[in-house]
Amino acid sequence: MSREVKTKKVRETDHSRHSQIKSIRLPLTEVTKMSEESEEKLTGPRIGDLAREYLEAETEGPDHSERLAKLRELRSELKIRREDYSERFSPSHPIVKRIDKKIESIDADIEDLEQEQEVQESLRDDFLKISEQFELTEEWLQPIALRALNHALYGSEREDLIIDKTRIETVEDVTELSYLERLDFEEKMLRVIEDARGNSSHTDEIWEWVQQEDRLELFAVMSSEASADKNRLSDVLGIESKTAKNRVEYPIYQHGPELTPYHSEGGTYRLTTPARYVAAKHGPFEYNEMEKEVEETATGEDEGTLSSFAQVDDQGDEVAVDGGDVDE
Protein backbone atom coordinates (compact mmCIF):
# COMPACT_ATOMS: atom_id res chain seq x y z
CA MET A 1 0.00 0.00 0.00
CA SER A 2 1.46 3.38 -0.95
CA ARG A 3 2.13 5.87 1.77
CA GLU A 4 -0.22 8.81 2.18
CA VAL A 5 1.58 12.13 2.11
CA LYS A 6 0.09 14.81 4.32
CA THR A 7 -1.12 17.91 2.54
CA LYS A 8 -0.14 21.42 3.49
CA LYS A 9 -0.43 24.89 2.08
CA VAL A 10 2.34 25.25 -0.48
CA ARG A 11 3.84 28.62 -1.11
CA GLU A 12 3.03 30.16 -4.47
CA THR A 13 6.57 29.71 -5.87
CA ASP A 14 6.41 25.93 -5.35
CA HIS A 15 2.78 25.36 -6.34
CA SER A 16 3.31 24.34 -9.98
CA ARG A 17 5.97 21.72 -9.16
CA HIS A 18 3.87 20.15 -6.38
CA SER A 19 0.83 20.09 -8.66
CA GLN A 20 2.84 18.35 -11.37
CA ILE A 21 4.11 15.63 -9.02
CA LYS A 22 0.69 15.03 -7.47
CA SER A 23 -0.95 14.78 -10.90
CA ILE A 24 1.61 12.16 -11.96
CA ARG A 25 1.32 10.18 -8.75
CA LEU A 26 -2.46 9.80 -8.78
CA PRO A 27 -2.69 7.29 -11.70
CA LEU A 28 0.03 5.11 -10.15
CA THR A 29 -1.72 5.17 -6.80
CA GLU A 30 -5.06 4.28 -8.35
CA VAL A 31 -3.61 1.38 -10.36
CA THR A 32 -1.72 0.10 -7.32
CA LYS A 33 -4.99 0.00 -5.38
CA MET A 34 -6.64 -1.78 -8.31
CA SER A 35 -3.91 -4.44 -8.40
CA GLU A 36 -4.40 -5.08 -4.69
CA GLU A 37 -8.18 -5.46 -4.94
CA SER A 38 -8.51 -7.22 -8.28
CA GLU A 39 -6.97 -10.13 -10.16
CA GLU A 40 -7.20 -8.13 -13.39
CA LYS A 41 -3.84 -7.72 -15.14
CA LEU A 42 -2.61 -4.44 -16.52
CA THR A 43 -2.77 -4.12 -20.29
CA GLY A 44 0.24 -3.36 -22.48
CA PRO A 45 -0.55 0.31 -23.17
CA ARG A 46 -1.39 0.85 -19.50
CA ILE A 47 1.98 -0.54 -18.36
CA GLY A 48 3.70 1.72 -20.89
CA ASP A 49 1.79 4.78 -19.66
CA LEU A 50 2.57 4.07 -16.02
CA ALA A 51 6.24 3.46 -16.81
CA ARG A 52 6.42 6.75 -18.68
CA GLU A 53 4.72 8.63 -15.84
CA TYR A 54 7.12 7.13 -13.32
CA LEU A 55 10.23 7.99 -15.34
CA GLU A 56 9.06 11.53 -16.02
CA ALA A 57 8.53 12.14 -12.33
CA GLU A 58 11.87 10.57 -11.35
CA THR A 59 14.11 12.03 -14.05
CA GLU A 60 12.53 15.47 -14.39
CA GLY A 61 12.07 16.03 -10.65
CA PRO A 62 15.02 17.67 -8.88
CA ASP A 63 17.17 15.85 -6.32
CA HIS A 64 16.83 17.82 -3.09
CA SER A 65 19.35 15.85 -1.02
CA GLU A 66 22.15 18.41 -1.25
CA ARG A 67 19.80 21.36 -0.71
CA LEU A 68 18.25 19.68 2.34
CA ALA A 69 21.66 18.95 3.84
CA LYS A 70 22.72 22.58 3.50
CA LEU A 71 19.47 23.87 5.00
CA ARG A 72 19.72 21.52 7.98
CA GLU A 73 23.32 22.53 8.56
CA LEU A 74 22.40 26.21 8.43
CA ARG A 75 19.50 25.66 10.82
CA SER A 76 21.80 23.95 13.34
CA GLU A 77 24.31 26.81 13.17
CA LEU A 78 21.56 29.39 13.62
CA LYS A 79 20.19 27.60 16.68
CA ILE A 80 23.64 27.65 18.28
CA ARG A 81 23.96 31.36 17.60
CA ARG A 82 20.47 32.03 18.88
CA GLU A 83 21.28 30.43 22.22
CA ASP A 84 24.53 32.34 22.44
CA TYR A 85 22.96 35.70 21.49
CA SER A 86 20.03 35.16 23.86
CA GLU A 87 22.43 34.83 26.77
CA ARG A 88 24.63 37.68 25.60
CA PHE A 89 21.79 40.11 24.95
CA SER A 90 18.24 38.88 25.63
CA PRO A 91 15.70 36.53 24.01
CA SER A 92 13.75 39.58 22.86
CA HIS A 93 16.71 41.37 21.28
CA PRO A 94 16.22 42.32 17.57
CA ILE A 95 19.13 40.16 16.40
CA VAL A 96 17.61 37.13 18.13
CA LYS A 97 14.24 37.88 16.56
CA ARG A 98 15.87 38.03 13.12
CA ILE A 99 17.38 34.60 13.72
CA ASP A 100 13.99 33.26 14.83
CA LYS A 101 12.44 34.54 11.62
CA LYS A 102 15.18 32.97 9.51
CA ILE A 103 14.84 29.61 11.30
CA GLU A 104 11.09 29.69 10.70
CA SER A 105 11.69 30.30 6.98
CA ILE A 106 14.22 27.46 6.79
CA ASP A 107 11.83 25.08 8.55
CA ALA A 108 9.16 25.89 5.93
CA ASP A 109 11.65 25.25 3.09
CA ILE A 110 12.72 21.94 4.62
CA GLU A 111 9.13 20.80 5.05
CA ASP A 112 8.31 21.61 1.41
CA LEU A 113 11.38 19.77 0.09
CA GLU A 114 10.81 16.76 2.35
CA GLN A 115 7.21 16.52 1.19
CA GLU A 116 8.24 16.57 -2.46
CA GLN A 117 10.97 14.00 -1.82
CA GLU A 118 8.50 11.75 -0.04
CA VAL A 119 6.11 11.92 -3.00
CA GLN A 120 8.94 10.92 -5.35
CA GLU A 121 9.83 7.97 -3.12
CA SER A 122 6.18 6.92 -3.04
CA LEU A 123 6.13 6.88 -6.84
CA ARG A 124 8.94 4.33 -6.85
CA ASP A 125 7.16 2.21 -4.24
CA ASP A 126 3.95 2.31 -6.27
CA PHE A 127 5.69 1.26 -9.48
CA LEU A 128 7.51 -1.60 -7.74
CA LYS A 129 4.18 -2.77 -6.33
CA ILE A 130 2.76 -2.85 -9.86
CA SER A 131 5.90 -4.70 -11.00
CA GLU A 132 4.87 -7.69 -8.90
CA GLN A 133 2.77 -8.54 -11.97
CA PHE A 134 5.96 -8.84 -14.05
CA GLU A 135 6.16 -11.64 -16.60
CA LEU A 136 8.00 -12.22 -19.86
CA THR A 137 5.34 -10.73 -22.13
CA GLU A 138 5.36 -8.08 -24.81
CA GLU A 139 3.74 -5.65 -22.38
CA TRP A 140 6.54 -5.83 -19.81
CA LEU A 141 9.31 -6.03 -22.41
CA GLN A 142 8.45 -2.70 -24.03
CA PRO A 143 11.58 -0.48 -23.95
CA ILE A 144 9.80 2.08 -21.76
CA ALA A 145 8.71 -0.62 -19.30
CA LEU A 146 12.23 -2.09 -19.15
CA ARG A 147 13.74 1.34 -18.51
CA ALA A 148 11.26 2.08 -15.74
CA LEU A 149 11.70 -1.30 -14.06
CA ASN A 150 15.49 -1.10 -14.09
CA HIS A 151 15.41 2.49 -12.85
CA ALA A 152 13.12 1.51 -9.98
CA LEU A 153 15.44 -1.38 -9.07
CA TYR A 154 18.85 0.26 -9.30
CA GLY A 155 18.54 3.77 -10.74
CA SER A 156 19.61 3.18 -14.35
CA GLU A 157 17.38 3.13 -17.44
CA ARG A 158 18.78 0.02 -19.11
CA GLU A 159 16.75 -1.79 -21.72
CA ASP A 160 17.67 -5.34 -20.84
CA LEU A 161 17.12 -7.89 -18.10
CA ILE A 162 19.78 -10.47 -17.21
CA ILE A 163 19.22 -13.55 -15.09
CA ASP A 164 21.96 -16.18 -14.94
CA LYS A 165 22.93 -17.12 -18.52
CA THR A 166 19.94 -15.39 -20.14
CA ARG A 167 19.86 -11.81 -21.36
CA ILE A 168 16.55 -10.44 -22.66
CA GLU A 169 16.15 -7.20 -24.59
CA THR A 170 13.02 -7.86 -26.64
CA VAL A 171 10.08 -10.25 -26.62
CA GLU A 172 11.74 -12.16 -29.48
CA ASP A 173 14.44 -13.29 -27.05
CA VAL A 174 11.77 -15.08 -25.01
CA THR A 175 10.88 -17.39 -27.89
CA GLU A 176 14.23 -19.14 -27.43
CA LEU A 177 13.31 -20.17 -23.89
CA SER A 178 11.35 -23.20 -22.80
CA TYR A 179 8.33 -22.74 -20.54
CA LEU A 180 10.34 -23.82 -17.47
CA GLU A 181 13.21 -21.48 -18.37
CA ARG A 182 10.75 -18.62 -18.66
CA LEU A 183 9.25 -19.51 -15.31
CA ASP A 184 12.67 -19.60 -13.63
CA PHE A 185 13.59 -16.23 -15.16
CA GLU A 186 10.36 -14.62 -13.96
CA GLU A 187 10.67 -16.10 -10.46
CA LYS A 188 14.20 -14.75 -10.00
CA MET A 189 13.19 -11.32 -11.29
CA LEU A 190 10.35 -11.30 -8.76
CA ARG A 191 12.88 -12.05 -6.00
CA VAL A 192 14.76 -8.87 -6.89
CA ILE A 193 11.54 -6.85 -7.01
CA GLU A 194 10.55 -8.18 -3.58
CA ASP A 195 13.97 -7.18 -2.22
CA ALA A 196 13.63 -3.69 -3.70
CA ARG A 197 10.27 -3.34 -1.94
CA GLY A 198 11.90 -4.29 1.36
CA ASN A 199 9.91 -7.50 1.71
CA SER A 200 12.80 -9.99 1.46
CA SER A 201 16.58 -10.35 1.29
CA HIS A 202 17.14 -12.85 -1.53
CA THR A 203 20.00 -10.85 -3.08
CA ASP A 204 22.01 -10.78 0.15
CA GLU A 205 23.61 -14.04 -0.99
CA ILE A 206 25.34 -12.15 -3.81
CA TRP A 207 26.76 -9.52 -1.47
CA GLU A 208 27.95 -12.15 0.98
CA TRP A 209 29.59 -14.12 -1.82
CA VAL A 210 31.47 -11.22 -3.44
CA GLN A 211 32.95 -10.15 -0.09
CA GLN A 212 34.78 -13.47 0.28
CA GLU A 213 38.44 -13.88 -0.69
CA ASP A 214 39.43 -11.44 -3.46
CA ARG A 215 36.05 -11.19 -5.21
CA LEU A 216 35.07 -7.66 -4.26
CA GLU A 217 37.64 -5.94 -6.46
CA LEU A 218 36.28 -7.76 -9.52
CA PHE A 219 32.74 -6.84 -8.49
CA ALA A 220 33.85 -3.21 -8.08
CA VAL A 221 35.21 -3.14 -11.62
CA MET A 222 32.15 -4.84 -13.10
CA SER A 223 29.80 -2.43 -11.32
CA SER A 224 31.72 0.50 -12.81
CA GLU A 225 31.69 -0.85 -16.37
CA ALA A 226 28.65 -1.28 -18.59
CA SER A 227 30.46 -4.33 -19.97
CA ALA A 228 34.01 -5.63 -20.09
CA ASP A 229 36.04 -8.35 -21.75
CA LYS A 230 38.89 -10.36 -20.25
CA ASN A 231 41.50 -7.94 -21.58
CA ARG A 232 39.84 -4.95 -19.93
CA LEU A 233 39.56 -6.85 -16.65
CA SER A 234 43.19 -7.94 -16.99
CA ASP A 235 44.35 -4.34 -17.46
CA VAL A 236 42.40 -2.97 -14.50
CA LEU A 237 43.05 -5.82 -12.07
CA GLY A 238 46.68 -6.23 -13.04
CA ILE A 239 46.38 -9.96 -13.67
CA GLU A 240 46.68 -12.29 -16.64
CA SER A 241 43.71 -12.26 -19.04
CA LYS A 242 43.24 -16.00 -18.50
CA THR A 243 43.01 -15.43 -14.74
CA ALA A 244 40.53 -12.60 -15.26
CA LYS A 245 38.41 -14.86 -17.47
CA ASN A 246 38.48 -17.65 -14.88
CA ARG A 247 37.45 -15.35 -12.07
CA VAL A 248 34.47 -13.81 -13.80
CA GLU A 249 33.26 -17.12 -15.22
CA TYR A 250 33.72 -19.10 -12.00
CA PRO A 251 30.29 -18.24 -10.51
CA ILE A 252 28.63 -18.64 -13.92
CA TYR A 253 29.74 -22.16 -14.67
CA GLN A 254 30.86 -23.57 -11.32
CA HIS A 255 30.03 -22.75 -7.71
CA GLY A 256 28.53 -19.30 -7.26
CA PRO A 257 25.44 -18.01 -5.48
CA GLU A 258 22.04 -19.14 -6.76
CA LEU A 259 21.46 -15.65 -8.16
CA THR A 260 24.49 -15.46 -10.44
CA PRO A 261 26.32 -12.11 -10.32
CA TYR A 262 27.88 -12.21 -13.80
CA HIS A 263 26.76 -12.94 -17.34
CA SER A 264 28.90 -13.98 -20.30
CA GLU A 265 27.96 -13.40 -23.92
CA GLY A 266 30.47 -13.73 -26.76
CA GLY A 267 33.41 -12.92 -24.50
CA THR A 268 31.69 -9.85 -23.06
CA TYR A 269 30.85 -9.83 -19.36
CA ARG A 270 28.12 -7.89 -17.55
CA LEU A 271 26.52 -7.78 -14.15
CA THR A 272 23.20 -9.58 -14.00
CA THR A 273 20.08 -7.66 -12.95
CA PRO A 274 20.23 -8.98 -9.35
CA ALA A 275 23.92 -7.98 -9.17
CA ARG A 276 23.14 -4.50 -10.52
CA TYR A 277 20.61 -4.12 -7.73
CA VAL A 278 23.22 -5.25 -5.16
CA ALA A 279 25.85 -2.88 -6.59
CA ALA A 280 23.44 0.06 -6.34
CA LYS A 281 22.44 -0.91 -2.81
CA HIS A 282 25.96 -1.33 -1.41
CA GLY A 283 27.94 0.99 -3.72
CA PRO A 284 29.06 3.15 -5.21
CA PHE A 285 32.46 1.59 -5.76
CA GLU A 286 35.45 3.47 -7.07
CA TYR A 287 38.75 2.22 -8.32
CA ASN A 288 41.91 3.93 -9.55
CA GLU A 289 44.44 2.28 -11.78
CA MET A 290 47.91 2.85 -10.40
CA GLU A 291 51.14 2.01 -12.16
CA LYS A 292 53.55 0.36 -9.78
CA GLU A 293 57.28 0.67 -10.48
CA VAL A 294 58.65 -2.49 -11.99
CA GLU A 295 60.57 -4.47 -9.45
CA GLU A 296 62.80 -7.27 -10.55
CA THR A 297 62.19 -10.46 -8.63
CA ALA A 298 64.57 -13.36 -8.15
CA THR A 299 63.24 -14.90 -11.34
CA GLY A 300 63.56 -11.67 -13.28
CA GLU A 301 59.80 -11.11 -13.59
CA ASP A 302 58.18 -7.77 -12.91
CA GLU A 303 55.16 -7.16 -10.72
CA GLY A 304 53.20 -5.35 -13.44
CA THR A 305 50.18 -3.16 -12.86
CA LEU A 306 48.21 -3.09 -9.63
CA SER A 307 44.91 -1.43 -8.89
CA SER A 308 43.47 0.08 -5.74
CA PHE A 309 39.82 -0.24 -4.91
CA ALA A 310 37.57 1.50 -2.45
CA GLN A 311 33.98 1.17 -1.39
CA VAL A 312 32.37 4.53 -0.65
CA ASP A 313 30.21 4.50 2.45
CA ASP A 314 27.04 6.49 3.10
CA GLN A 315 29.07 9.48 4.31
CA GLY A 316 31.13 9.57 1.14
CA ASP A 317 34.24 8.23 2.87
CA GLU A 318 36.29 5.57 1.13
CA VAL A 319 36.69 2.19 2.77
CA ALA A 320 39.78 0.40 1.50
CA VAL A 321 39.29 -2.94 -0.17
CA ASP A 322 42.44 -4.98 -0.80
CA GLY A 323 42.45 -7.91 -3.13
CA GLY A 324 45.13 -10.43 -3.93
CA ASP A 325 45.87 -12.22 -7.14
CA VAL A 326 44.54 -15.65 -6.27
CA ASP A 327 42.95 -17.84 -8.94
CA GLU A 328 39.53 -19.26 -8.10
Image (spheres, helix red, strand yellow):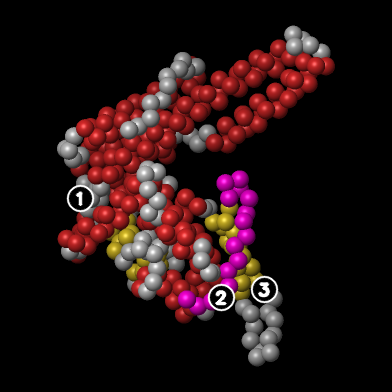
The residue at 61%/74% (across/down) is 305
Residue 41 horizontal/vertical position (percent):
18, 40
Is disc 3 surrounded by few (<14), some (14 to 19) or many (20+) residues within 10 Å? few
Q: Is residue 38 magenta?
A: no
- The percent coordinates of residue 85 (x first, y second) are 78, 18
Which amino acid, mark 1? Glu
Depicted 73 relative to depicted 261: above or below: above
> Which residue is the site of mark 2?
325
Residue at 47% x, 55% y: name it.
279
Secondary element type, mark 2: loop
Residue at 29% x, 64% y is 166
Tell which circle, 2 or 1, labels the residue nearer the N-terminal end.
Answer: 1
Q: What SS does tag 3 mark?
A: loop
Circle 3: residue type: Lys
Q: Nearer the viewer, residue 22 or 322?
A: 322
Q: Which segment did they paint magenta?
A: 313-328
